Amino acid sequence: MSAVDDMDAPGPRVRDDMTVEVALSLMAGARVEYLLLCDGDDQCTGSITRAELAVHRGGSTYTDRLRLRDVLALSS
């Protein structure tokens, strides 16, 4: 996940336990194309784009309980 090379970049920061649905809603409301992902210590660990989430949302294994950390694991 490398939408943002500089993890100090401005933008919404979220925890990886957020669901894909909530993340997509947040992105739409904030009018951003990516979110910065943070761990439990609020350290930035990566980023995810709206396009990446859309791919998983359209997949046959998608459920409304899919979390960002699950997307990261599927993409690895």
Image (cartoon, rainbow, N blue to C red):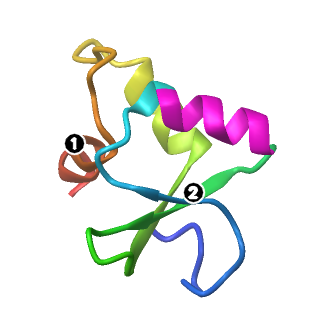
Residue at horizontal 37%, vertical 41%?
A: 18
Identified at 81% across, 43% down, the residue is 31
Is 24 a magenta residue? yes
Q: Which mark is residue 70?
A: 1
Q: Who is closer to the viewer here, 76 or 7?
A: 7
Is 33 left, or right, of 45 in this rendering?
Answer: right
Which quadrant of the structure image shows residue 19? top left
Toward the right, the furthest residue is 31
Q: What is the crowding at mark 2: few (fewer than 14 residues within 10 Å), some, or many (at least 20)? A: many
**Residue bearing the label numbered 2:** 35
- Does the magenta run of residues contain 3? no
Percent of width and height locating residue 42:
38, 75
Q: Which mark is residue 42?
A: none
Report the front residue among 54 and 29.
29
Q: Which residues are magenta?
A: 22-30
Q: Secondary structure at mark 1?
A: helix
The residue lying at 73 percent from left, 34 percent from top is 28
Q: Is residue 65 left or right of residue 38?
A: left
> What type is the residue that disc 2 sits on?
Leu
Q: Position of residue 40 (x, y in %)?
A: 26, 68
The amino acid beneath tag 1 is Asp
In the rendered image, which quarter contains the C terminus?
bottom left
User: Looking at the image, do the residues carrying marks 1 and 2 touch, with CB atoms under 8 Å apart?
Assistant: no
Dividing the image into 4 quarters, which one contains the N terminus?
bottom left
Label 2 sits on a secondary structure element that is strand
